Amino acid sequence: MTETRMPAYEQVKAFVKRQISSGTWRAGNAVPSESALQQQFCISRMTVNRAMKELAVEGVVTRVQGSGTVVAQLHRISTTLALRDIHEEITERGHRHATRVLAVEPAKADAALAQVFKVRAGTRLFHTVLLHLEDEVAIQLEDRYVNPAAAPGYLGVNFNATTPTSYLLEHAPLTKASYSIEAGLASMSEARHLRIKRGDPCLVMTRSTVSGPHVASFARLVHPGMRYSFNGTFQL
């Protein structure tokens, strides 16, 4: 469906989200007034007001009484969900983190990834495979896909100096995250990289993140069960 066929209030919402996702408007920047948007789209003030109310509910903008509307701070979810960066996690234990880069490449979304990212099959994605070590012992095999629309510079990152999680939290601020954790058995490839036996028990986390209007990343994180446990803190 093209934008011109959208309901008028959806056109306003799409315009605001596009300005934010492109980086034209950043967190804290003022959003044009309702009267300005009314003139730009040639629609009623009530229609514009509906669009801005829905954007506020979605957390895209913040409406400040007497001061207008501004782009929301998209990293606000970090106050309720601790999404751990493995480098920080290892450092907090007083140990040394290192990364071995196994793959950094463009990829195309297959049917499953297209569903995860809400894009068409064949859409260009970024793909990385990294091995994380704690004091030279492999503790996580990270297989991650990233949406270029959310993080266009991702393939140019030096992953020996920063982790994907750290980079994405900075460049594709988190608005939503979902994950699952299950037991699994190491495949031949996973066992080789993690230096365990094929079929050894592992803890497997799959995690997707959303930044503004985009599904930003999808990662499969495999940990040797005998070397790793998940810990987290939640606030209500």
Image (cartoon, rainbow, N blue to C red):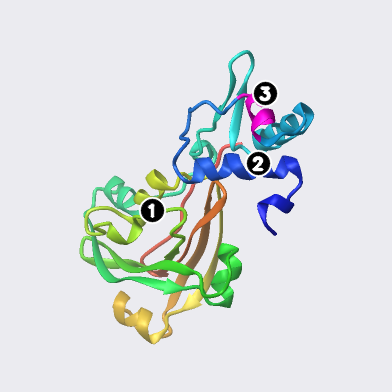
How many residues crowd around disc 3 within 10 Å: few (fewer than 14), some, or many (20 or more)?
Answer: few
In contact (CB < 8 Å): disc 2 and disc 1: no
Residue at figure coordinates x 71%, y 44% from the top left: 10
Q: Quadrant of the N terminus?
A: bottom right
Q: Which residue is mark 3?
A: 35
Viewer can see residue 221: no
Viewer-nearest of labels 2 and 1?
A: 2
Q: Which residues are magenta?
A: 33-40
Sequence order check: which comes first, mark 3 or mark 2?
A: 2
* 212 to 109, vertically: above or below: above
Sequence order check: which comes first, mark 2 or mark 1?
A: 2
Image check: 139 left or right of 1? left
Image disc number at residue 13? 2
Is residue 79 on the magenta stretch? no
Viewer can see residue 169: yes
Q: Which residue is mark 1?
A: 165
* 178 to 109, vertically: above or below: above
Is residue 37 on the magenta stretch? yes
Q: Main secondary structure of the magenta part?
A: helix
Sequence order check: which comes first, mark 1 or mark 3?
A: 3
How many residues crowd around disc 1 within 10 Å: few (fewer than 14), some, or many (20 or more)?
Answer: some
Q: Amino acid at mark 2?
A: Lys
